[in-house]
Amino acid sequence: MAKAKKKEYGIKQNPALKQIAAPVLAYEPPRPRRYNPPIGLIGCGGISASHLGAYKKMGLNIVALCDKIPGRAENRRKEFFPGAQVYSDYHQLLKRDEIEVVDIATHPSDREYLIPAAISAGKHVLSQKPFVTKLDKGEEFAELAEKKGVVLAVNQNGRWAPHVSYMRQAVNKGLIGQVAGAHLRCSWDHEWVRTTDFNRLHHVILFDYAIHWFDMINCYIADKKPLRCFSTLMRAGHQKSTPPLLGQTLIEFEGAHASLVFDAAVSFGQEDVSYLTGSKGTLISRGENILNQPVSLYTGKGYSTARLKGQWFVEGFMGTMGELLCAIEQKRQPINNPRNNLRGLAMCFAAVKSAETGKPQVVGQVRSTNPKTCRVAPK
Ligand SMILES: NC(=O)c1ccc[n+]([C@@H]2O[C@H](COP(=O)([O-])OP(=O)(O)OC[C@H]3O[C@@H](n4cnc5c(N)ncnc54)[C@H](O)[C@@H]3O)[C@@H](O)[C@H]2O)c1
């Protein structure tokens, strides 16, 4: 009697693939050929140390440092660029004609007046993230920069974290074909915000932190229209800081989908994973943190694992400023230009509103963030 065929319900093992050499991709931060202009930095708070460390490594020419809180700019001067002039009033920095590029590392509310002031003074500008709290404001800044003939870029440094940059290049080169799924999960400990101003920012996860991940999705699924976002957000039962640390978002595109999961109250066993799958293959990147991860590529040709040089918290910051300087030198728009960034922000705004309403939101229809939940609340 013929043996009944075992039902497998489509469950398969991965086909045996041979190991091949990892594709060589230009993932390292871009560097201008000759352009090394005088640069001023406004906002010498926590993150400015990462900016200045990267600029020192690049051999950039930081000539001015400004912070309205006494002592902050002076401390950065001593540590990174002893020859720089220190200011407490940004107008004084902007008055210096030889300064061509201004890096603005304040919170978004201060950037709302600092960005137009710097552009109007004829400076090229690198803005920290999240770029703006209103999409129309971002458009307005992009138009103002065009009108004044200067270049504006957004410091989405995650794009040049080695593994993210490698995956972006792999996707851009079509190595996995049409991307159909992008699933990013971060499981780490964000309780450090407890002793900082971020403890008074309700959406420290879905707005302040996740904007890097919305920007990654923006890059990985660049050719499809984002349609809707649905999010949840809650406090972990054991967390000590004030803002809710558990957030997640689903994003629908035309012919693709994405998910972001943030477990930001992990005490042990943290992990960060990206899984991108397309019509020709899959990219997987995994590590215990976001700094540097090996990236594996699976296609019909075989599988490979790329071990990459650098770390997010150096190369990421070299990448954003390097791309701005290359764009100025080559008279083109940087890839981290404001209009491109606004696409990621539109997803972020919709995700934040969804978490607040419990309902899916159409991407692009949520034009601004809720000032009560997306700004550092006054003390
Ligand atoms: N990976 C990243 O890129 C990353 C990481 C952390 C923070 N950030 C972003 O960087 C920005 C700043 O964060 P932070 O942690 O450094 O904040 P912070 O509060 O430590 O520093 C901000 C600084 O800006 C100064 N400032 C504000 N207005 C000013 C003005 N008009 N003139 C001069 N100085 C002024 C403040 O005095 C303060 O020292 C935020 O938007 C945050 O989201 C980015």
Image (cartoon, rainbow, N blue to C red):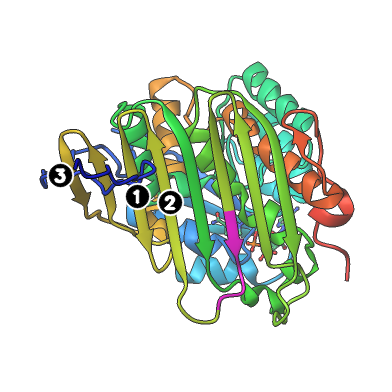
Look at the numbered disc 2 and give the secondary structure of its residue. strand
Q: Quadrant of ligand 1?
A: bottom right
Q: Is residue 161 left or right of residue 33?
A: right
The residue under label 2 is 274
**Within 10 Å of the Cα at label 2, are there few (<14), some (14-19), or many (20+) other Cα atoms?**
many
In three-dimensional space, the C-alpha distance between marks 2 and 3, rounded to whole angstroms, equals: 21 Å
Residue 363 placement, left or right of 290: right
Would you identify the image quadrant in which residue 246 lies? bottom right
Residue at image location 62% in from the left, 26% down from the top: 339
The answer to whether 246 is drawn above or below residue 297 in the figure is below
Query: Please, what is the three-letter code of the amino acid marked with disc 1?
Result: Ile
Could you tell which of marks 1 and 3 lies nearer the N-terminus?
Answer: 3
Look at the numbered disc 2 and say if its residue's Cβ is closer than 8 Å to ligand 1.
no
Q: Position of residue 161 (x, y in %)?
A: 40, 51
Q: On the picture, is 305 further left or further right than 320? A: left
Work out whether residue 54 or residue 335 is closer to the camera in this orientation and state it.
335
Q: Position of residue 232 (x, y in %)?
A: 73, 55
Which of the two discs, 1 and 3, sits closer to the camera?
A: 3
Front residue (pair 15, 206): 15
The mark total stands at 3
Q: Nearer the viewer, residue 274 or 343?
A: 274
Q: Earlier in the sequence, mark 2 or mark 3?
A: 3
User: Is 265 included in the stretch rendered in magenta?
Assistant: yes
As shown in the figure, which amino acid type bears the numbered disc 3? Leu
- The residue identified by callout 1 is 284
Name the element at disc 1: strand
Magenta residues span 261-266
* Mark pair 1, 2: CA separation: 6 Å
Q: Residues within 10 Å of mark 1 (few under 14, many from 20)?
A: many
